[in-house]
Amino acid sequence: MIKLLKYGNTNCYYVEGKNGSILVDTDWAGTLQACYKKIKELDITKIDYLLITHYHPDHMGIAQEIIDNMNAKLLVIDIQKDYLHCSDKIFEKDKKSKFTPINTEPLIISCEKSRKFLSDLGIDGEIIYTPGHSDDSISLILDDGIAIVGDLYDLNSASAFNDDKINNSWRSILSHNISKICYGHHEQMLDK
């Protein structure tokens, strides 16, 4: 089961399996109360893991607060490990938002081991590396045809960028028989 958590500027997704759950992305620092309100509305009682599609401020702003307050574990794909703190300096300059940098030891796995990890949670799918928007971008691909792609450039406009990384990422995503694309900021797209 997948639920959209829209409580700010970023689309976040709750994916629940038989044995565990994953929250994909958070929003800006300062949105924790709005997040809690949406979690309550959607009757979400537990978040086992937090997966960030890429470590830009609008996708990881309340990551540590979710980890601390919901007892979630941070799941990091190995190609992302050097990017965990790339937004810290942005938040240091933003005096309006209360930000807590990630200060927890993450669980680091590879894309190759993601299918087994997700299967243990009762989620059928895998995590793939999809650079293009950023070098640390990943996507969660569910076997039922849903792809959560974060900020990867919209499929309809990706070709205009004429960028091999973006085009290769989309080829990789679409090779999984995708029927629904869930973006970080766009409306969900039902057709390829």
Image (cartoon, rainbow, N blue to C red):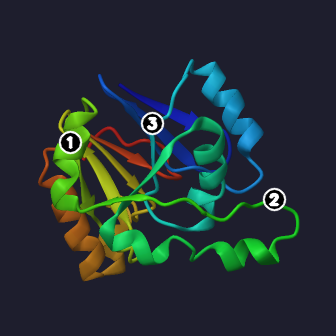
Q: Earlier in the sequence, mark 2 or mark 3?
A: 3
- Left or right position of 136 against 179: right
- Residue of label 2: 98
> Would you identify the image quadrant in which residue 38 lies?
top right
- Between circles 2 and 3, the one closer to the viewer is 3
- Residue of label 1: 125
- Left or right position of 91 against 39: right
- Dot 1, how many residues are within 10 Å of its Cα: few (below 14), some (14-19), or many (20+)? many
Tell me where residue 26 appears, x and y as whole percent: 58, 49
Determine the residue positioned at 38% across, 67% down: 137
Q: Is residue 155 visible?
A: yes
Residue 76, relative to residue 16: is it above or below?
below
- Between circles 1 and 2, the one closer to the viewer is 2
Determine the residue positioned at 44% across, 59% down: 106
Tell me where residue 32 appears, x and y as whole percent: 72, 43
In front here: 37 or 49?
Answer: 49
- Residue of label 3: 48
